[in-house]
């Protein structure tokens, strides 16, 4: 039995090495720019949620909030802008399940999150290698947690936690599931130089909208993604962290992305989301290009205080919070 396992592991590593070599030769170019704005906000008082029994009952498919590992990728550059908004809003709905993966130490935030700030010791830059470094730590921490679902989001996401849980209840964590939404209109195509012959193609779920991976699938990724191997994958194919996740799952694991349109990134027009559908959405985002904000159209606080509209959105969904207008 042990010999068979060693043979299988060796076979996977050989395939990985061959795939990486092929992509090295392909010369794929991706220029992703981060145009999301840094929003300086006033110091936000972090208040406990007033209702603590929202998710304590047993749910369908034996999935509850406690079965979900939610990771949020952030950086020291946004620790006083994006992070306080999350801590004041949707973090309050899942304090034990949300972990922040950053590149600095901040005692105040450690206290506010009850020690849920993880210093990855990765660089604070937005370069591919450093983003992949953080994703690698996120993945390993999920494996250690023993949770049934791994859900990744960025620090410019607002997550409707109850809706996230209800959607996960419709999928079996013991099966292979890769849930998310694409940000491109066709799959990533890898060509071989100099012939420009198509070698393979795959879809990926954009990290800016968030994605979820079942534990069954995450365990199958172990030989190629755990213990820092994910960083090697990123460097081998020269693609960003979320694209590399898609490469591993769709190309190496041969598992298809399942499209879930309720995930949303800053690459969409947020204002086109009708307010009557907000409760049905999983994630929201925002961006600022020049002086124009791409945000959800929701009533609430003055835009000078709440330019991202996340505070107003939270109060729209959960009006019982103390900071919400009465």
Image (cartoon, rainbow, N blue to C red):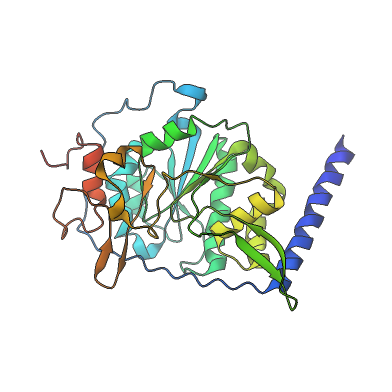
Asked if residue 167 lies left or right of residue 48, the reply is right
**Residue in the picture at 37% in, 69% down:** 35
Point 36% across, 42% down: residue? 281
Q: What is the x, y in percent for residue 125?
A: 47, 69
**Towards the viewer: 46 or 107:** 46
Q: Is residue 301 visible?
A: yes
Across and down, in percent, residue 193 comes to: 73, 76
Q: Residue at x 48, y 29 (%)?
A: 169
The image quadrant that residue 197 belongs to is bottom right
Q: How many marks?
A: 0
Residue 233 is left or right of residue 285, and the answer is right
**Looking at the image, residue 239 lies above or below residue 119:** below
Picture residue at 28% right of the left edge, 57% below the top: 295
Above/below status of 69 relative to 166: below
For the N terminus, the quadrant is: top right
- Asked whether 141 or 289 is in front, the reply is 289
Q: Could you tell me residue 250's position as x and y percent? A: 65, 51
């Amino acid at each position: 039995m042990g010999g068979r396992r060693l043979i299988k592991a060796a076979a996977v590593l050989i395939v990985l090495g061959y795939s990486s070599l092929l992509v090295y030769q392909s010369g794929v170019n991706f220029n992703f720019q981060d145009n999301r704005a840094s929003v300086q906000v006033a110091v936000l008082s972090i208040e406990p949620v007033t209702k603590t029994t929202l998710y304590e009952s047993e749910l369908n498919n034996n999935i509850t909030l406690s079965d979900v590992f939610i990771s949020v990728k952030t950086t020291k550059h946004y620790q006083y802008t994006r992070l306080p908004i999350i801590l004041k809003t949707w973090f309050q709905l899942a304090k034990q399940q949300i972990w922040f993966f950053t590149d600095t130490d901040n005692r105040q935030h450690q206290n506010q999150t009850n020690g849920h700030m993880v210093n990855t010791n990765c660089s604070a830059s937005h370069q591919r290698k450093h983003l992949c470094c953080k994703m690698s730590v996120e993945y390993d921490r999920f494996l250690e947690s023993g949770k049934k679902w791994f859900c990744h989001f960025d620090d410019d996401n607002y997550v409707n936690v109850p809706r996230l849980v209800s959607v996960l209840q419709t999928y079996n964590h013991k099966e292979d599931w890769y849930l998310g939404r694409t940000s491109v209109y066709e799959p990533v195509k890898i060509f071989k130089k100099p012939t420009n012959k198509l070698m393979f193609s795959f879809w990926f779920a954009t990290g800016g909208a968030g994605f979820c991976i079942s534990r069954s699938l995450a365990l199958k990724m172990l030989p190629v993604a755990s213990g820092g191997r994910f960083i090697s994958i990123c460097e081998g194919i020269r693609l960003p962290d979320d694209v590399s996740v898609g490469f591993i799952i769709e190309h190496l694991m041969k598992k298809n992305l399942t499209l879930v349109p309720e995930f949303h990134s800053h690459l969409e027009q947020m204002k086109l989301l009708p307010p009557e559908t907000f409760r049905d959405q999983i994630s929201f985002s925002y961006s600022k290009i020049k002086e124009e904000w791409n945000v959800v159209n929701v009533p609430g606080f003055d835009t000078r205080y709440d330019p991202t509209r996340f505070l107003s959105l939270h109060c729209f969904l959960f009006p019982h919070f103390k900071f919400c207008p009465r």
